[in-house]
Amino acid sequence: MSNPAAPAALSFDEARRQIESAAAARLAGADPKAVNGELPALEFKKGEISVALAFKAFQERDFFSCLDVLRQYYRSFPELSRAFSGANLVADLASPVTRKLAERRSREAEDELPPQVKIAFRFDPRTGGGSVTFTKAGLLQQEEVNCVLDLWQRHAFAGATAATDGDAALALERLGAVVFRPDPDFAEDRLAGYEQTKKEVRDTIVLPLVHPEVFQQIGALTRTRPGSSVPRAVLFEGPPGTGKTTMARVIAGQSGLPMVYVPVESIMSKWFGESERRLDAIFAAAGSLGRSVVFLDEIDAFAGSRDKPMHEATRRILSVLLRQLQGLVDTSNVVVVGATNRQIDLDPALLNRFNRSVHFPLPSPPERAAILRYYAKHLAPAEIAALAEASGGRSGRELEDACGMAERLWASELIQSGEAVRAPPGEAYLRAFRLKFPAE
């Protein structure tokens, strides 16, 4: 009987598609002079799969950076030996205790565990290049595919010159993304109300981006391995129209970073394999920008939970997104902000990838008053209070739309009457609000 808790292995075709498409997208977005690695080569023969990663420059000291990557995915390394011009390593997704208990129970129980993988490191002293080859008697797990891509990414562009910002921005625009250059004037006052939410974002996201050295120094004092608490992925969740997109631009403006806005339509495609390729290419181009904020709007539309019925194309997009957030892109340069109206629909594995989650609630009465003062500054406090009372349960965007309706209706009245232009009175706003928000 198979173990229902054991994760299913990927087919060879799916593993090859994920690895080759991700690597090809990354190579396509890079300056040819910057490329240090070749396209990974996969082979499946007599029940054994092999993945070969070749690099133009690859020396013995690079073994330790490879080991740092492998330790993030494999639980143990039961064997390590020297070889001619390199080293051989055996890696295991299962812990030594789990492997030992399975051996004691039965041969069948041991077979239910994923097979160990052999990893060969070779260094050529004549050319300065080398390779890493994964060999496994069986198919790869998703974690192992992610590991291969992460290790390849670490060395495929080592010591290379990245593409220029202009090249990366042009590539992103061709992919349907929109690049907003950092705008210092795009400050918190662009988002009226929401003082508590703005403070949370300022303290936990903006400050770490503006002063990363302070957080790195604290990490050096507190952590066994070097690291910091600077967020790499942040989730904005809340009802529509509550300022999630505006807040992403505020983060980019205050931290001096460009923002890459990724709408759903820039990813989705009717062609097989195109959607995940586009998402991979967007991340690759964003990584070439240097430090940047990638804003994924309506992330629930293409990253739903795998516990529910899901189209195969959506499943592949989710797999790419999980891999990207896990480290394929240099996430020290790219901060990912996802926005959703329905957090409950997101895949649990994706939720675990976000370092921070910020809730954007519907505005309270004082916050509605603050928003209304932003769009109707000429009204008296009592009139603002009356409008705030008449718009309970409405989002900031709905309040802006209602104020816009009041302006249009008032302009129409002035044109028809021939009167001089003046600001709409409070009664004009109340009439518009009754039309926009009829009593239920």
Image (cartoon, rainbow, N blue to C red):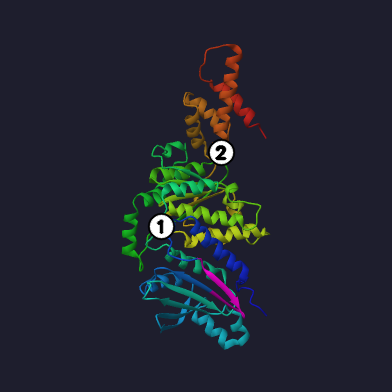
State yes or no: discs 2 and 1 in contact (Cβ < 8 Å): no
- Residue 232: image quadrant is bottom left
Mark 2, Cα crowd under 10 Å, few <14 / some 14-19 / many 20+, is: many
- In the rendered structure, the answer to whether residue 405 lies left or right of residue 381 reads right
Counting residues from the N terminus, which is met first, the one under dot 2 or under dot 1? Answer: 1
Element assignment for label 2: loop
Q: What stretch is highlighted in magenta?
A: 39-50
Residue tagged by mark 2?
395
Q: Residue 68, position in %: x, y?
A: 41, 70
Instruction: Name the amino acid type tagged 2.
Output: Ser
Q: Residue 128 carries which label?
A: none
Q: Residue 287, position in %: x, y?
A: 45, 54
Magenta span: chief secondary structure? strand
- In the rendered structure, the answer to whether residue 194 lies left or right of residue 105 reads left
Residue tagged by mark 1?
332
Q: Which residue lies at the image location 61% right of the left edge and 14% below the top edge? A: 416
- In the rendered structure, the answer to whether residue 221 lies left or right of residue 281 reads left
Mark 1, Cα crowd under 10 Å, few <14 / some 14-19 / many 20+, is: some
